[in-house]
Image (cartoon, rainbow, N blue to C red):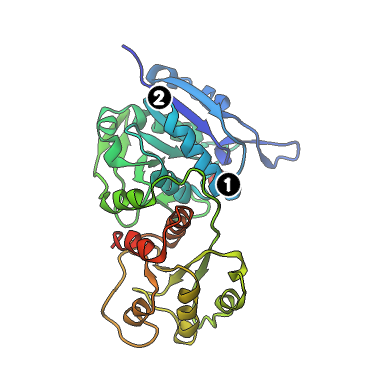
Amino acid sequence: MTLPRIKVLALGGTIATRPDASGAMQMGLGADDLVAAVPVLATLAEIDAETVSRVGSHSLGFDQIHALAAKIATLQADGVIVTQGTDTLEETAFLLDLLVDRDIPVIVTAAMRNPALTSADGPGNLLAAVRVACDPWVRTHAKALGVMAVMLDEVYAAGDVLKTHPTRLNAFASPQTGPLAALVEDRVVPLALPVREAMTRARAGIGDVSSAKEQPVALLWLGLDEPGFMIEAIVGDRDQLGYRGVVLGAMGGGHVPERSAPLVTQLAERLPTVVSPRAGGGPMLRQTYGGPSSEIALRKAGLIWGGRLHPLKARVLLETCLRAGLGRDVIAEVFDAFG
Ligand code: ASP
């Protein structure tokens, strides 16, 4: 029986660390090391391992993920596994989902516990990712599943997965939708297919962004009584401090503090500005509350309505739309599809 050909691309992260002389964990392991630590992989797949970088995911850049997506686009493989750090996995997986158009499983995995610790989770997560990539249900539905994250024996959709804890072993979850599948013994148990209409529309609207330039997007989280000084600084600067778009982590169903509402309106006149729920995702209100700082007024004032995406994912989507050269109205349509 021929085994599926699985490409493992290693970017770095805790899964790829090793201790230095002081005992501090440093980036160091490559893709071959990660694969060699799990000998059973050879019975499941024909693995081809490649080290792409050795960086913590907190230091990854948009351009690196665009280059990774271009590499994945041309790979001769039956499945692709990206190993990286956990810190930005919820963003990189979503960006890959926007950029990669393949009908093979593309999976991102990582580790919360480093290789020097007892019960490090990296080897188990890599094994689980390979099992998922080789699974017949996953392979049949690869396009419908989109890019997946596999952590602690659960499979998550890239658009929904969040890192919900900084240190705990079970740090990943899809709070809005739950996992797509679970691993039990050596089986993948399917649970759900993601709703992909909004992603499909977003990807069609975005098109090819392979040669486009970085478009910095500010993420401003609005807290109790926010005076709006940061917004004022962006609005008051001739070049908007270098930003090309803004995501506001807004209150409730799409509200901002009344004292900053005039500034938020001015911001939306200067730059594409997306309102996204600081509650961590979920559909927002459109026509319930009146007053100058609620959704009816903000939508009339030209704020782009973020839909059910988490603000971190909204920022990734806005950056990608801006790279694609989309104007405000088209960007608003892309976000509108997310509810
Ligand atoms: N800072 C690390 C990273 O994201 C943490 C991890 O991998 O869990 O690369």
Instruction: Say what secondary structure mark 2 lies in.
Output: loop
Give the quarter of the image for residue 141. top left
* Closest to the observer, 266 or 133: 266
From the image, which quarter does the C terminus lie in? bottom left
Q: Residue furthest right?
A: 21
Instruction: Determine the CA span between mark 1 and mark 2.
Output: 25 Å
Instruction: Say what secondary structure mark 1 lies in.
Output: loop
* Closest to the observer, 32 or 266: 266
Q: Which mark is residue 77?
A: 2
Answer whether residue 121 is visible to the viewer in this image. no
Q: Which residue is mark 1?
A: 60
Q: Residue at the spot x=47%, y=36% of the render?
A: 70
Q: Residues within 10 Å of mark 1 (few under 14, many from 20)?
A: many
x, y percent for residue 306: 37, 65
From the image, which quarter does the N terminus lie in? top left
Q: Residue at the spot x=54%, y=83% of the render?
A: 227
Q: Amino acid at mark 1?
A: Leu
Above or below for 42 versus 333: above
Q: Which mark is residue 182?
A: none
x, y percent for residue 172: 42, 49
Q: Residue at the spot x=49%, y=50% of the render?
A: 168
Residue 53 located left or right of residue 282 = right
x, y percent for residue 303: 40, 73
